[in-house]
Amino acid sequence: MKKENTLFLKIKTSFAPRLWTRNLFELLPGVTAVALLAWVSFLLSRYIGIELLGFEKSPIAPILVAILLGIMITSVMPTFEILTPGIRFSVGKILRFGIILLGIRLTVFDVLRLGVYGVPIVIICIASALLITTLINKKLNLPSRIGTLIAVGTSVCGVTAIVATSPAIEAEEEETAYAVAVITIFGLIATVAYPYLANFLFSGDAVKIGLFLGTSIHDTSQVVGAAKVYADTFAKPLALNVATVTKLVRNMSMGVIIPFLTYAYRKTKQTTDQPNRLASIGKLLPMFILGFLLMALARSVGDAGINANGKAFGLLELDAWKSTIALAQNWGDNFLVVALAGVGLSTNLRRFRGMGIRPFFVGLGAALSVGVVSYFAIYLLGNFIVY
């Protein structure tokens, strides 16, 4: 018996390279298709946001374009079987790589710059958005996973938070795509309207306006777009700086919120389906979130080295360190767009019909509530912030 097992292992090992090559060729067509779709999405995002709408940086995320294009393609023609393995690989593995690389954007120094009064404002807005959105979702009797995705997209960082939370709570591709669409629509409305609304509400106070834009608009690109509109229109660039830092602080909360939501989801699942089974630490803190946190830590340590002796990790000069950060950011963005192009190509529109218009009411309630909470939190604490 031992000899037979040994022989089987030798045969299996000898064929491993061939199996690896076969898997590579199976993945190649689908990965190529989603990469091509992602490239087209980047071009359309720039054309619509910059050429047509006149923004310096497009507020229309390539991720949204990729999802919509993918859904449109799937609606008019079926997905070829040869593409399926590569699309699944993109939605799974490439998505996680992109999320890990996003951590390079963040540093603990961003929190310190915002100050002791700015961080509580961000926390209040995040907590209220999570709570209110969850309550609205339950009231409308929608699936808990789509409510969770809309809640985390509203409270943390829009599309990025949705795609990071989706695999942690085992959301379907259709649920992810729907949540992204809802968040993006209301985020775009806020991008256009909030710069002028904020100027009226806070009487031209650049710090308070930056806080409001950074806490009430969903996606990072939309926050930057709205803040740039305000800065250019009213000649107050400080609002852009404050809004950007505020949004980065919101983004950092992903490392805490996603494990918490994963725990809540697992606990509910155990109660209904598996009462005697405990969730493992690996499921509560997925490896890609751990990688995300490690990248943020690396960014913080590298920045500390630059501030201390002019070298990140004692090796990289300032220009080289900036180039490294930019490279990681670009690849992270590219991976996410590729992954979400795969989501679009694997999304079945028939699943949307069962959800109807209700998720949009959840998104509307979430957007309005976080805006109101942000206003009152800044009204109470904003005067203490000196930026």
Image (cartoon, rainbow, N blue to C red):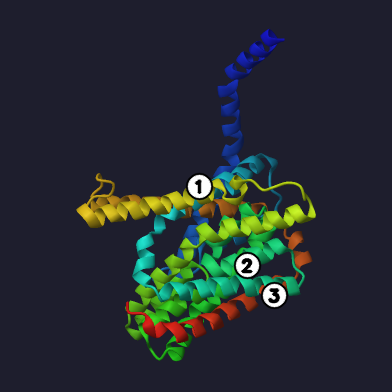
Specify the label residue 97 is tagged with: 1
**Which amino acid lies under the numbered mark 2 shown in the image of this protein?**
Ile
Q: Residue at x 67, y 55 (%)?
A: 173
Toward the top, the furthest residue is 3
**Which amino acid lies under the numbered mark 3 shown in the image of this protein?**
Ile
Specify the label residue 150 is tagged with: 2
Which is more toward the observer, 76 or 131? 131
Q: Residue at x 60, y 28 (%)?
A: 22
**Which amino acid lies under the numbered mark 1 shown in the image of this protein?**
Phe
Could one spot residue 55 in this view of the protein? no
Q: Is 206 on the left-hand or right-hand side of 172?
A: left
Q: Quadrant of residue 72?
A: bottom right
Q: Is 347 on the left-hand or right-hand side of 292?
A: right
Give the residue at mark 3. Answer: 136
Specify the label residue 48 is tagged with: none
Where, quadrant-wise, is the N terminus in this rendering?
Answer: top right
Disc 3 secondary structure class: helix
Could one spot residue 380 in this view of the protein? yes
Which is more toward the observer, 306 or 339? 306
Which is more toward the observer, 267 or 294? 267
